[in-house]
Image (tube, grey):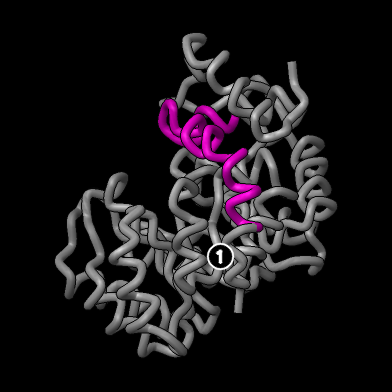
């Protein structure tokens, strides 16, 4: 249902930590003009963990309004509380989101059966298309392929963002879930290879900075055109790495600030990018074709 370069959108902020609506509108326009295939609102890169329930749902609704149906909007609605995940997903559906992205429940370390029951409950309660999100480096729980394969039998669970960077695992999921569930990369550094193997897209941090290049690279990789995909991706590899010099979204918020999309502001406990990394990230942006000083 969804494919291509799906940007894990930053949330531009003003100096007081409030959402910068003018910068957000400019950012949405940038993605619409650049060929971004879908917008993921209020995911990890959007700093969702620092937003109140009310702020979270209001921002998803506002992004849906700004996009105005031109491309899909996928709302981050995951929680380590199953009931809260149900409520956020239901609200996202009510506010017009095209799908929900649900991270594995973090901190409380559920079993594989607990993960299955969690996702099945949300899917049964809310008939919105849903994408699983496995990122054990952040959540301290790893959703194993056999659990994903069970969940793929549920009709409105339509994809997984697999952010481990494990291409062998991705290949297994692409094969075992074919026709039931699409596999998306959540790791820009290995995204091209995942799509060349049959993955359907990349939920991307890098796409914030170079949306046009990521759109074309993803399109080429999904179509199996390795030469074209590599031709583009070789200039993005330093940026894929540079955007994780510190915890996401610290580097990408700084990069977008340099490009004129909001101030260099994160909500605590996140802090601005260390001065030690500025030159390295600027070099990576230049290599990717971004014209900033």
- Binning the other alpha carbons within 10 Å of mark 1 as few (below 14), some (14 to 19) or many (20 upward) gives many
Q: Percent position (x, y) of residue 125?
A: 43, 82
Which residue is located at x 64 percent, y 49 percent?
231
Vertical side of 292 occupied by 138: above or below: below
In the rendered view of the protein, which quadrant contains the C terminus? Answer: top right
Magenta extent:
228-253
Image position of 218 (left or right of 79):
right
Q: Where 106 sits versus 101, above or below?
A: above
Please tell me in which quadrant of the rendered image residue 32 appears.
Answer: bottom right
Q: Residue at x 69, y 42 (%)?
A: 210
Judging depth in this view, the residue of 259 and 140 nearest the camera is 259
Q: How many marks?
A: 1
**Residue in view at x 53 percent, y 39 percent:** 237
Residue 265 vs residue 224, the one in the foreground: 224
- Is residue 110 located in the magenta-colored stretch of the structure? no
- Horizontal side, residue 228 vs residue 259: left or right: left
Query: What kind of secondary structure does the magenta stretch mostly adopt?
Result: helix
Reply yes or no: does residue 247 show up in magenta.
yes
Residue 54 visible to an observer of this rendering = no
SS for callout 1: strand
Q: Position of residue 180 (x, y in %)?
A: 44, 87
Establish if 162 lies above or below 107: below
Q: Return the residue nearer the eye: 234 or 254.
A: 234
Q: Position of residue 62 (x, y in %)?
A: 73, 54
Whole-percent x, y for residue 19 in the image:
67, 36
User: In the picture shown, does residue 247 fall above or below 101?
Assistant: above
In percent of the image, x 60 and y 79: which residue is there?
Answer: 1
**Residue denoted by label 1:** 201
Q: Position of 74 compared to 164: left or right?
A: right
Which quadrant of the view contains residue 23? top right
């Amino acid at each position: 249902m969804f494919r291509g370069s799906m940007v894990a959108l930053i949330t531009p902020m003003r100096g007081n930590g409030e959402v910068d609506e003018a910068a957000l509108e400019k950012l949405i326009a940038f993605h619409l003009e650049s060929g971004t295939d879908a917008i993921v609102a209020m995911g990890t890169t959007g700093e969702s963990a620092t937003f109140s329930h009310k702020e979270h749902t209001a921002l998803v609704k506002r992004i849906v309004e700004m996009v105005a149906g031109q491309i899909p909007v996928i709302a981050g609605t995951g929680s380590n509380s199953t009931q809260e995940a149900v409520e956020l997903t239901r609200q996202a559906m009510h506010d017009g989101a095209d799908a929900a992205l649900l991270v594995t429940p973090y901190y409380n370390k559920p079993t594989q059966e607990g993960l299955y029951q969690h996702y099945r409950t949300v899917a049964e309660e809310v008939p919105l298309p849903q994408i699983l999100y496995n990122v054990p480096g952040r959540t301290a729980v790893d959703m194993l392929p056999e659990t994903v394969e069970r969940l793929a039998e549920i009709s409105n669970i339509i994809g997984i963002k697999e952010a481990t960077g494990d291409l062998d695992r991705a290949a297994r999921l692409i094969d075992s879930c074919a026709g039931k569930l699409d596999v998306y990369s959540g790791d820009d550094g290995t995204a091209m290879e995942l799509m060349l193997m049959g993955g359907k897209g990349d939920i991307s941090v890098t796409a914030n900075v170079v949306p046009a290049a990521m759109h074309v690279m993803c399109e080429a990789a999904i179509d199996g055109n390795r030469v074209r995909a590599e031709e583009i991706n070789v200039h993005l590899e330093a940026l894929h790495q540079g955007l994780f010099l510190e915890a996401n979204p610290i580097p990408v918020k700084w990069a977008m600030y340099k490009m004129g999309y909001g101030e260099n502001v994160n909500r605590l406990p996140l802090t601005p990018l260390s001065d030690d990394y500025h030159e390295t990230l600027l070099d990576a942006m230049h290599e990717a074709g971004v014209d900033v000083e």
